[in-house]
Image (cartoon, rainbow, N blue to C red):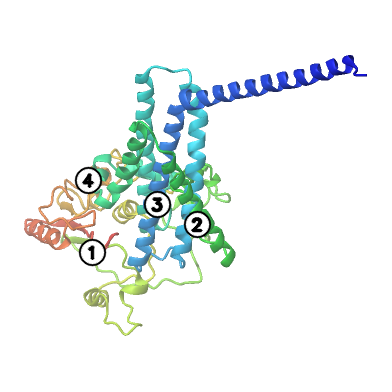
Amino acid sequence: MIDMHHISAYVDENFHKKFFTNVTMKNIRILGEKISYFLTERQAYAFRFSTAFFISLIALGLVYRLRILLMIYTDSAFTISTRPLALFFHGMCNESLFSLLFALAVFLFVAPFLSFIQHRTIKSAIFAKGILILLLFAFLYNTSYHFWVSMNTGFTRDLLFEALATTRMDEAVHFLTFADALFFIIPIVIYLFVIFRQQFPKWQLRIVCTFAIFFMAIHNIISIIHSDQIENSIVQPPAQYTFLSFFEKDNWNTTETFSNLTSSSDQMKSIALIDPRFVNHRIKPTSAPLLARSKEQWNVLIIIMESIGKQYIFDTSKGNPLPMPFFKQLSEKGLYFDFHYSTGNTSPRSIFSLLSGLYPSPRVQMFCTKPDVVVPSIKTYLGESYDAFFVTPGSLDWFFPKGFLKNSGFKEIYGYKEIPARVVKDTYGKNDIDAVTFFLQRLEKSKNRPFVAIYYSFAAHWPY
C-alpha cells in the first residue's frame, strides 16, 4: 500500500527546498541588482574620475619615457643608460603600476564622498580639482626630464627648495618649448575627454589596460634575459621619486656642524681651508712673484665661463686641434692656477664665491640668491671710484645672485631682458656674440676711469 504520510512528507520537503531556493536566488539577484545600481549610478562619477586619472597618467608617463628615449639616441652626451629600450620598458612598467595604484586610491577616496553628493555643481568642482592635480603631475614630469638631462638626477626635495628660492614662475613659463607643453596638454585633453563624454566605452579602458599589461610583460621578459639591475632611479615615476626624496635622512640635517671641530679650533678662525680634512698637505703649493703695489688703479676684467674643466680644455689626445688656443696663450703669459677646484656645484654659488672670496653656504636653500644679502664683493674693496657693471646673456631672475651684486656696489647689471641681442633657439639665453658686442660698447664708456667689468657667458652653460 502507498504510505500517504511519506508522500506528504516528501512533497513538503521538496516544496520547501524549491521555495527557499527560489527565494534565496531571488534575494541574491535583487542584492546584485542593488550593488550594480550602486556601482553604476551612485559611483559612476567616481569610476569615471579615477579612470580619467589612470588613462591620463599612462599617457603622461609614455610621453616622458619616449622623450628620454629620444634624448638617449640623439644626444651622445646623455649617457644615462647603456640599454635604452630596457630602460624604456622598465620605466613604462613602473608608470603603469603607479597609474593603476593612484587611480585606485582616487576611487577609494572619492567614491564614498561622491555617493552622498547629488548636486552637479559640487561634482563639477571636484572634477576641476582633478585638472589642478594633473597640472602638478605634468610639472613634476617635465621638470624631472630637464633635471635628468642637465644634471643626471631627478627632481628632489633639495632641488625643489632651491628652485623656489631662485626661480620666478613667469621666467620658467617663458622658456617652455613645444615639447614641454606636451606634458601639460596631452593628459589634460585625455582627462577632459573621459570626464565629459556621456558614455565611456569599456573597450577603450580595456585597450589601456592591455597596453599597461604589455609593458609589464616585456619588462619581465627583459628582466629574465638580463639579470643585472637596470638603472634604479630613472625608472621610477617622477612623482614617486620626488615624494620619496622628502624622506631621505640627509635632507633633514639642516645644521652646518662638523663632529670634530670646535669653536676654538684654528679652522673656525680662518676663512682659508687649513684643516687636514680639507687640505692635502702632501701637495706643496708653488709661489708666484707678486706685482709690486702701485698707486695706479688697476682695471679689473673678469670673464666667467662654465664647463671648461682643465681635463679637456687643452686636450689633444685624440689627434684633435687644441680646443682653446687663445686661452692657452693667456695661461702662458699670465698666472695660471692649474690646481684650482670650484667652490660650488651650481652657477649662483660659484659666482658668489668668485666675487666675494667666501665659501658658499652648504645648505640646500641658497643663501647667495636672496635679495637682501649684504656681503662685500670685489667692488666693495675697490671702492666707489670704480665703474662696476655685470653683463650676461642669461636671465637675472633664474638662479642668479642679483641681490648680492646690487647690494655690494654693482649698480649696472644687464641680463636677458636688458641686452638687445638675438634669442638663441632651444636655450635659455641670448646670442653670446651680440652680448659681447654690448659688453664692449659698455666697456668703451669706462675708458676714462678705472673699472671692474664682468662678463658671464651663457654659451658654455647647459644646454650649450
Answer above or below: position of 291 versus 44.
below
The CA distance from mark 1 to mark 4 is: 49 Å
Q: Quick one: label 2 or label 3, which is nearer the N terminus?
A: 3
Q: Quadrant of residue 298?
A: bottom left
Q: Quick one: label 1 or label 4, which is nearer the N terminus?
A: 4
Q: Of the numbered discs in the image, which one, if any, rests on residue 90?
A: 2
**Image quarter (top left, top right, bottom left or bottom right) of the N terminus:** top right
The front one of 173 and 272 is: 173
Q: Quick one: label 3 or label 4, which is nearer the N terminus?
A: 3
Check disc 4 and report the residue beneath it.
Answer: 174
Q: Amino acid at mark 2?
A: His
| Residue 306 in the image, given as x and y percentages of width and height | 30, 62
Q: Amino acid at mark 1?
A: Arg
The CA distance from mark 3 to mark 4 is: 25 Å
Q: Quadrant of residue 229?
A: bottom right
Q: Quick one: label 4 or label 2, which is nearer the N terminus?
A: 2
Categorize mark 1 by other alpha carbons within 10 Å: few (<14), some (14-19), many (20+).
few
Q: Quick one: label 1 or label 2, which is nearer the N terminus?
A: 2
Q: In this image, 235 relative to 260: left or right?
A: left
Q: Give the residue at x 20% y 50%.
A: 383
Check disc 1 and report the residue beneath it.
Answer: 293
Q: Amino acid at mark 4?
A: His
